[in-house]
Image (cartoon, helix red, strand yellow):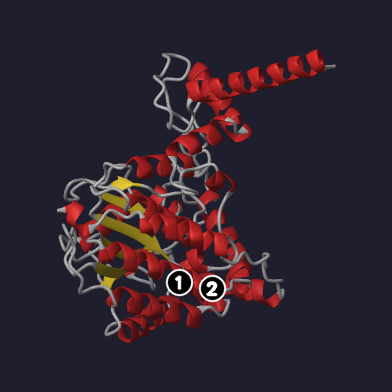
Amino acid sequence: MARYASTLLIALIAGLALFAGFNALVDPFGVTGAPGIPGLTERDTRLLDDGGRVHVADRLARGGDGSILLGSSRTVDGFPHDPAGWPGGIYNAGMRGTNIFELGQAMALAARNPELHCVVIGLDLDEFGTHSKAKATYWLSALTDGRTWLSLARVSLSPNTFGASVQLIADNLTGGEPRVPWADTYEAGTQRQRYEDGIRGIYRWYLGYRFDPERLAMFETVVNALTAQGVQVTGFVHPLHAWREEAMVRAGRVEDYVAFREDLADVFARYADRAASDACVPGGAAVLWDFSGFQPFASLPAPATGQTAAHPAFYEPSHYLPHIGQAMLERMLLERTASPYGSAPFGVPLTPQTAEETAAAMLERRAAWLATPDGAAVTAILDAVAAGDPAPEAQTPQYLNRDDLRSLAAKLDAIAPAAARR
């Protein structure tokens, strides 16, 4: 019996070692540094299979970047992979499907490194809702505890990694790539249908949305800690196409949104006067911009029913194109004033002094847009949706707990001091 148990244990350990070794060698998330094997693992096609958490967290933990750009899939898809013109360069560390809990952990993790001087982070109501806290691969990544070696062990032993490893090898053998939902041209009607289906779904989502003030308080804790040690934090409110913004208004969330803008402005204002060790944008240690609110570039008409050419600014109502993101960076650097289409406003500084005025301007722009054929089309769609009395897309609330805040506090305690950044 003892020999049988020993043999079984040895076989189990050997199997785990082979499993982990295979994943480490293929390295689908780009964390082990294993060399690519030509024709087999050379092309990294699966770095973002998990939304990018494992790969991004590993890079942030290892450090070396002077500026990082954080956010959800809007950041992943809405900015170039390597944005141009940013002083010293900026790493696009966007993660799909993320929220302010994961983003706060990422900010704290990156700030442990003295090379980091600037954090640019995209924000909107989505990130501060109770509907989400962390995706499954968060617990594999270095975002959890900041230990790259422990993350590497978790990733190597994960079935998710094995699936990505097999798919990466298949991609290299067949020339395949991950499916991308965006294109330069579409079949007639595809884009229009995407816009219409998108706002029907997002209307129900907004009906069930619940803002979490504890998430905002957590974010302020991170901004406070980073700016206290000389890291400049620049926030920006993501642009959404007017169709999605109208769905938000019609679902009764405009008051939440206006209050959210005011609260964010207050948070950034409290730390704006601190000294940044090597500021990237003008305006102090904490700077906030708003690119939302029915601004002209986001109110360009949705694709026509038979249109095949891609919309010039938005993939669909929730995601903008990379040239918009590039222009937003230039706006924050004060290197441009107008959108890529020559329209203004294009981004407005958001402070406690401007919050009320810019909210009123947003509602004025909405009223003008509703009078256009595009606005009338959305009104008809949402009237039909509302007439059906749809049930809210309610999800089980996921509140922050003591362990969540403890893990964040541990990272904040390890932030590199301001003196090390000079």
Mark 2 element type: loop
Tell me: residue 354, above or below residue 399: below
Q: Which residue is mark 1?
A: 216
Tell me: residue 356, above or below residue 143: below
Q: Amino acid at mark 2?
A: Asp
| Left/right of residue 193 with respect to residue 233 in the rendered view | right
Q: Quadrant of residue 219?
A: bottom left
| Left/right of residue 348 with respect to residue 17 in the rendered view | left
Residue at 50% of width from left, 68% of height from top? 128
- Image location of residue 164, percent across then percent down: 56, 30
CB under 8 Å between discs 1 and 2: yes
Q: Quadrant of residue 263?
A: bottom left
- Image location of residue 397, percent across then percent down: 64, 67
Q: Which residue is mark 2?
A: 212
Residue at 45% of width from left, 59% of height from top? 408
Q: CA distance from mark 1 to mark 2?
A: 7 Å
Residue 302 vs residue 249, the one in the foreground: 249
Q: Amino acid at mark 1?
A: Leu
Residue at 32% of width from left, 81% of height from top? 358
Q: Quadrant of residue 370?
A: bottom left
